[in-house]
């Protein structure tokens, strides 16, 4: 399998991992990003990709970055809601005791 084909397959797995939201495995994702960097380095050093394949690779990389940013934002919002809920429970407990 060519480096480009491996990269395309890996990108599909990364997009699937990003789509998991609550079940997102950060350690797995980070490991796969390291593998992706190595594959990308190999693709570049080979230099055997066409202009259209290069364009698709750049587009896929941008989409991957955007999907990761969106997941980060969603998880941040979930964390805010959880913290807001905790504060509400704490406030309720304080009022209840008084």
Image: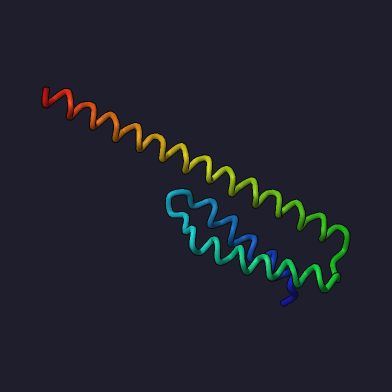
Q: Horizontally, is 26 left or right of 61 in the view?
A: left
Image location of residue 87, percent across then percent down: 29, 31
Q: Relative to 80, does residue 16 appear above or below in the rendering?
A: below
**In what quadrant of the picture does the C terminus appear?**
top left
Residue drawn at x 47%, y 55% is 24
Residue drawn at x 49%, y 58% is 26
Residue farthest toward the right in the current orientation of the protein: 51
Q: Write down the quadrant of residue 60 in the picture.
A: bottom right
Residue farthest toward the left in the current orientation of the protein: 97
Circle count: 0
Residue drawn at x 51%, y 64% is 28
**In what quadrant of the picture does the N terminus appear?**
bottom right
Q: Relative to 61, does residue 45 appear above or below in the rendering?
A: below
Q: Nearer the viewer, residue 16 or 41?
A: 41
Q: Write down the quadrant of residue 33 in the picture.
A: bottom right
Q: Nearer the viewer, residue 90 or 36?
A: 90
Residue drawn at x 18%, y 27% is 94
Image location of residue 2, percent across then percent down: 75, 75
Q: Horizontally, is 66 left or right of 54 in the view?
A: left
Question: Coloring scheme of the render?
Answer: rainbow
Q: Write down the quadrant of residue 92 in the picture.
A: top left
Image location of residue 12, percent across then percent down: 62, 60
Q: Relative to 64, does residue 12 appear above or below in the rendering?
A: below
Image location of residue 16, percent across then percent down: 56, 56
Q: Relative to 93, does residue 35 appear above or below in the rendering?
A: below
């Amino acid at each position: 399998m060519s480096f480009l084909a491996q990269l395309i397959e890996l990108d599909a797995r990364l997009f699937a991992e990003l789509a998991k939201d609550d079940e997102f495995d950060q350690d797995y994702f980070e490991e796969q990003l390291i593998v992706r960097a190595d594959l990308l380095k190999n693709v570049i050093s080979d230099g055997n990709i066409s202009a259209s394949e290069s364009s698709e690779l750049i587009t896929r990389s941008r989409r991957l970055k955007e999907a990761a940013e969106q997941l980060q934002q969603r998880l941040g919002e979930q964390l805010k809601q959880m913290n807001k809920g905790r504060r509400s429970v704490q406030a309720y407990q304080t009022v209840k005791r008084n």
